[in-house]
Amino acid sequence: MPQETALYEELSAWDNLDFHADLFGLARQEKKARITQMLDLVQLQERKRSRVSTFSGGMKRRLALARALLHDPHLLYLDEPTLGVDVQSRRAIWDYILSLHKEGKTVLITTNYLEEAQALCERIAIIDHGKLIAVDTPEHLKQTYAGLVVELQTAQPSAAADDIRRLPGVKEVVQEGTSLRVTTQGGSDVVPQIITLVTGAGELRQIAVREPTLDEIFLRLTGTALRD
């Protein structure tokens, strides 16, 4: 399933699938049942006779997914499967992909949406300028390349920021007004010391401790500069 849907827009949804079923070599006796099954899967049965040119972007992506699944492949390659689709269609496509995994199929996805990778993938490869930077499970990537993220709200810009930077196990400290974000390296042993320093200065208003997001790990590995 390429990034561009590459559907024949002057044809109906049914005719698009019928044409590709012939290209895939589906037997005539099973073709009609398979097309019906795929249209049901992507919830386009009621629009099967409509021209694709009348479809929304999300409907076209779902039809392209139906086409990719038409011949029941064991390996499926999806290039940015939810690019430009609405929230409901994105969730529906995610559900389809997860159901394929449960059936024992292998799905390879390229995506710029890190939350999509988190939701769908058992293993993630991060590529930067054509080079493989890291490949691992989402959880192990978090453990390896970032510790916990401690987010603190203070009454005024914290005077403890420099002391926190000097603590063993602190990887990064970002001060933005009264918000202080501390990224640790490794486990949570240093978190009580961070809280003690901020509390001792009488500044602490609010605190939250969370795991890093894949976006944060991606930026840590590849940098934050804008790309062409």
Image (cartoon, helix red, strand yellow):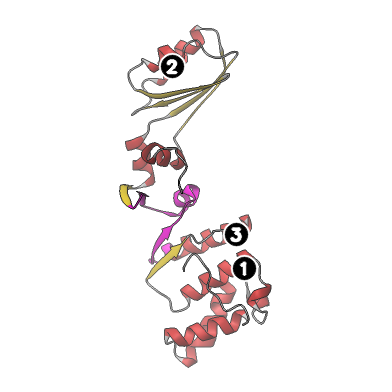
Residue 22 or residue 228, whichever sits in front: 228
Asked if disc 1 and disc 3 are in contact, CB closer than 8 Å, the reply is no
On screen, residue 29 above or below 16: below
Q: Residue at x 59, y 13 (%)?
A: 156
Instruction: Give the residue number, with chain letter if any, for mark 1.
Output: 59
Q: Residues within 10 Å of mark 2 (few under 14, many from 20)?
A: many
The mark that comes first in sequence, 1 or 3, is: 1
What is the magenta range? 101-130
Q: What amino acid type should be assigned to the residue bearing mark 2?
A: Ile
On screen, residue 205 above or below 77: above
Q: What amino acid type should be assigned to the residue bearing mark 3?
A: Val
Q: Residue at x 45, y 12 (%)?
A: 196
Instruction: Give the residue number, with chain letter if any, for mark 3.
Output: 85
Q: Residue furthest bottom?
A: 28
Q: Within the image, what quadrant is residue 13 found in?
A: bottom right
Q: Report x, y in % for residue 210.
A: 47, 31
How far apart in space, not on screen, are marks 1 and 3 (Cα)?
8 Å
Element type at mark 1:
helix
Q: Within the image, what quadrant is residue 102 found in?
A: bottom left
Left or right: 159 as drawn, with respect to 49: left
Q: Residue furthest top?
A: 201
Q: Residues within 10 Å of mark 3 (few under 14, many from 20)?
A: some
Q: How many marks?
A: 3
The mark that comes first in sequence, 1 or 2, is: 1
How far apart in space, not on screen, are marks 2 and 3 (Cα)?
42 Å
